[in-house]
Amino acid sequence: MGDLVIALAGNPNTGKSTLFNALTGLNQHTGNWPGKTVAIARGRFEHAGLTIELVDLPGTYSLLASSVEEQVARDFICFGGPAATILVADATCLERNLNLVLQVLEITPRVVLCVNLLDEAERKGIAVDTTKLAAKLGVPVVPIVAREGRGLAELKERLIEVATKSGEKAAYQPVYPEQIERAAKELVPQIADMLPAGLNPTWIALRMLEGDESILTHLPQLAPVFAEVQASTRGQVDALRDQIVTAIYRQAEAIAAAVVSRPARQRTDWDRKIDDLLTSKLFGYPLMLALLAGVFWLTISGANYPSQALAALFFSIEDRLTQLFLLAGAPEWLHGFVVLGVYRSLAWVVSVMLPPMAIFFPLFTLLEDLGYLPRIAFNLDGLFQRAGTHGKQALTMAMGFGCNAAGVVAARIIDSPRERLIAMVTNNFVPCNGRFPLLITLASLFFGQGALMAGGLVAAGMVVGLVLLGITITLLISWLLSKTLLRGVPSAFMLELPPYRKPQIGRIIVRSLFDRTLFVLKRAVMVAAPAGGVIWLLANLTVGGQSLITHLAGRLDPFSRAIGLDGYILLAFILGLPANEIVIPILLMSYLGAGAMLELDSLSALHTLLVGRGWTWLTALNTMLFSLLHFPCATTLLVMRKESGGLRWPLLAVVITTGTAILVCWVIAQGARLLGLV
Amino acid sequence: MLEAQRLTQLAIGHKATVRSVEAQGLTRRRLLDLGLVPGTTVEAVRHSPAGDPTAFLIRGSVIALRASEANLIHIL
């Protein structure tokens, strides 16, 4: 706990997280809100000899508690006891932001208002008179440009003043129609004595009038009075609430009109021009595809060299390790288990996964930072709507390209439980970073021979094709689910398309490397190391002269052949349940029968090995399809269990995905054989 | 007397004023929280390439709404 706890609140897309990062630097951590599926970041900074703990509340438009995020934000400001609250407002649409500001001022006068994005406002010719705004609201107002760190020094000064000064200050209080004011006034004396100090009784009275039962979780003593209020307002709650919201917006309008000046003539609106292109009927979808293909191509071609360099490095270390074991006179099995099992699978996972992730995640974060992701949701919503699901599923799907477990967590942005479950269950149909190496390697080995450049393009095209298939199946299964198990009406879809923002390269690199790349890598390593040991054992423990892997693969072989694979491939997928990235290493290890994973010195050696094992284009294609469509990895399943609160949905996800994978592979294998293509 | 117009009927590039919101429950709260209270000026900005949803300029920010929601908003 710091000396002072400060809440940070604001509308979505106001640069709230940018300010949070600017203030706390890397000194932060993200955790779940107790009992809620809402992530809360906390961070610290020092100022004037005080340690300040900053709590980054979810971005919300209002505090009237109609969503989990709003309830979390409101509860923290009301009952979490922050010494002060920093509110971040967007200078380019102050009016809507003031709606939230006025709601917070009703709860507490200990507020510092930051008017952010002044640079963007200047470009649009919008000026905000912050002095006048401060006078109107009765709280300090600090103009800032969070991304450049402008105004932060003043913000810290004002913050300490507000947080440490004792005594109540008079901040602006919204005024309501007479009937509501009168009803609230009548209620205040009945409840004032029951409230903890510091809580504004008028504000509580208003919540009771508009029938907000969520306040009872913190103030159960109000239940009897609340029941009386509800009896007397029956049938009018909606109307009362409308009047309250309308009154606040009217006042926000009036304040904004007095402090904001706009240019007489509208300047060229670049956001609109960019959107004209990116979401146009003609170019919207092709551009989206081109961008996707571009990201994959950069990832594939860029990861090639560093992957090889890393592999060379790790295997030279392995040679040293082997020498060390020999010197120490360690038994053969120990060397095998530790070096050839645990170490080698670690080396493999890091050298295969780190480079593509270190390219893919920054690129993805760049698109996120630019503001392109909401446009993807906007473009694709029509399809998801027809599938009976939420447009934001496009975003959770996009996140799945990085990591499906992350995609399942991201499904929290969907409010309706029905649509959130559909998004979680189908997330695995887009390939994550753990599966891209397999797709990319096989695509370039079997479908992208020839000149490096052209071959790379063909392989990238193949991967894009698979991704499109994954998206099609996502939509199809979503539609099936919303017609059967998860029937229901689509919930309301409201998506803000924020202005495009100049990306902050430094922040993108830090965020994508620390929050995503290293996170996913750490997980993969933690899983791959023990799995490597276990697989080494399976490959080296022999029964009747044959290794356990060979026995198991033999059992799976007939079924595997029917779906165009072989027993070793299917076994590799099953043993790869802990992490998709170890599927290829396991496969190679069992093919070589050598009992240890192959030292992959070149792609052509791999090609020769696979062809020698009877691989054709069909084997490669079906292995890629199976990888795309099969059961989620263990981490994703565990996350799904946590998020859905039970085993039911993760199990269903396994059945649906694996069923789809088997069906698709079977149809293709049988079809190809029937037509004599192989 | 003009017949009641709905937000879905607003042509791209045109503006109108919100008269009333017909939605109920959570959807109604959401729409109001975005600032779609009676008297608010709304401009239709663009359709998605698939035709639906449509983006509207509401109080300085661009918000996409599906036809099913926009149809619940009466305009003048």
Image (spheres, rainbow, N blue to C red):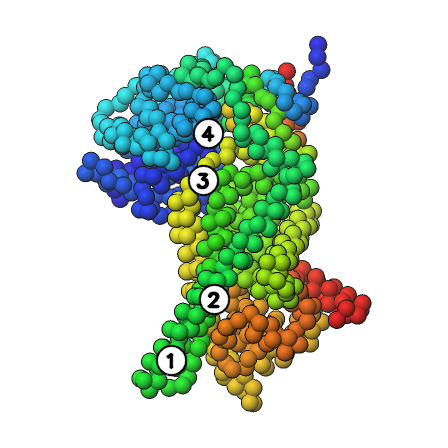
Residue wearing tag 1: A322
Residue at image coords 61%, 32%: A276
Q: Chain of mark 4?
A: A
Residue at image coords 63%, 22%: B13
Give the number of the mark in front: 4 or 3.
3
Which quarter of the rendered picture does the N terminus of chain A lie within?
top left
User: Relative to residue A173, is residue A301 drawn left or right?
Assistant: right
Q: N-terminal of the two: label 2 or label 1?
A: 2
Inter-mark Cα distance, 4 to 2: 52 Å
Residue sitting nearer the eye, A357 or A528: A357
Q: N-terminal of the two: label 1 or label 4?
A: 4
Kind of residue at badge 4? Ser
Q: Position of residue A428 (x, y in %)?
A: 58, 55
Kind of residue at badge 2? Gln
**On screen, A302 above or below A486?**
below
Indicate the secondary structure of the residue bearing disc 2.
helix
Tell which residue pokes out farthest to the left in this image: A49
Residue wearing tag 4: A62
Contact check, label 4 and label 2, Cβ < 8 Å: no
Residue wearing tag 2: A308
User: Relative to residue A207, is residue A270 drawn left or right?
Assistant: right
Residue at image coords 68%, 36%: A281
Residue at image coords 36%, 35%: A148
Indicate the secondary structure of the residue bearing disc 1.
helix
The 10 Å Cα crowd at callout 1, few under 14, some 14 to 19, many 20 or more, is some
Q: Is residue A216 visible?
A: no
Kind of residue at badge 1? Thr
Q: Is residue A7 visible?
A: yes
Residue wearing tag 3: A503
